Amino acid sequence: MKNYLIVGIISLLLFSSFKSDKPAYLLFNKNGKAVKYEKMLKQLEDADIVLFGELHDNPISHWLQLELTKDLYRQNGKKLVLGAEMFESDNQVIMDEYLSGKISNRNFEDEIRLWPNYKTDYKPLVEFAKDSGLYFVATNVPRRYASLVNKQGFEGLDDLSDEAKTFLPPLPVPYDSTLNCYASMMKMEGMGSHVTANFPKAQAIKDATMAHFILKNWEPGKILLHYHGAYHSENFESIYWYLKHENPELKIVTIHSVLQDDISELTEENTGAADFTICVDEDMTRTR
């Protein structure tokens, strides 16, 4: 009997050791120091806005988004507001009607423009908002207007109708072409003749629109958690820049996501890109 007990204890220890040697992700602060999730959550207590930069096809990003949403709701209740790049501003009415129970899930999914991985990755967030009575902001620019900017620059927006302009930030849109997030797009490999001066502006109109609708739906005393691709807040640029441009006093915390072959420490390249960085093993399965 004693031998069986010893073998069992050894097996348990070995199994526990094996598990701890294969974490799916590690969390690091701005200085590249590994930190616990609870420490990040503690820092978010004073935030006005949390910018969560995800990897669109990464299940760890999406799982942590949902977990963070639940924890912030426990901390803040109805003071928590959600927002996402994955929904465009001209679909806000459809989002509102679904969250308030005026239309069915079938109508919602048929009529709103959903990303291919909506059901696995973003539906849990929308359903949590619905069940918890939280407001969910569709922040992104309608894709037709991003396409217009890519063709004609910001000037292409000037001739839109007054109704169309309600889905955009106030014009003219401020733009700093020297920001690395935009300047680097002019040097993207493999784009060839497709890269024009308007190419990064099409990215900027997305950032500016998301920042605009974040601010429109935030007020002092609330916390707005926004989900978007990591590039949209990396290195404290993009959405972050537009938010600070409008309100320098905002307390913004950024969360970034990266893949690495070895996640035991953050590489120099990935260090400092955000207040907190989720480092995921690059072998992690993809969601689409």
Image (cartoon, grey):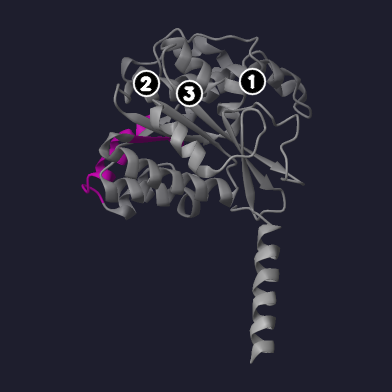
State the extent of the magenta-drawn residues as a range. Answer: 81-103
Q: Residues within 10 Å of mark 1 (few under 14, many from 20)?
A: many
Q: CA distance from mark 3 to mark 2?
A: 20 Å
Q: Contact, CB < 8 Å: mark 2 with mark 1? A: no
Residue 140 placement, left or right of 29: left
In primary-sequence order, the first of circles 1 and 3 is 3
Q: Which mark, by number, is residue 145?
A: 3
Nearest the camera: 203 or 223? 223
Q: Position of residue 133 (x, y in %)?
A: 25, 44
Residue 203 is one of the magenta-drawn residues = no
Residue 99 placement, left or right of 201: left
Q: Position of residue 154 (x, y in %)?
A: 52, 12
Nearest the camera: 90 or 96? 96
Q: CA distance from mark 2 to mark 1?
A: 21 Å
Q: Residues within 10 Å of mark 2 (few under 14, many from 20)?
A: some
Q: Which mark, by number, is residue 181?
A: 1
Residue 47 placement, left or right of 186: left
| Residue at x 56% of width, y 45% of height | 61
Q: Contact, CB < 8 Å: mark 1 with mark 3? A: no
The residue indicated by pointer 2 is: 215
In the image, what residue type sits under mark 1? Cys
Foreground label between 1 and 3: 1
Q: CA distance from mark 1 to mark 3?
A: 20 Å
Q: Position of residue 262 (x, y in %)?
A: 76, 46
Q: Position of residue 208 (x, y in %)?
A: 48, 19
In primary-sequence order, the first of circles 2 and 1 is 1
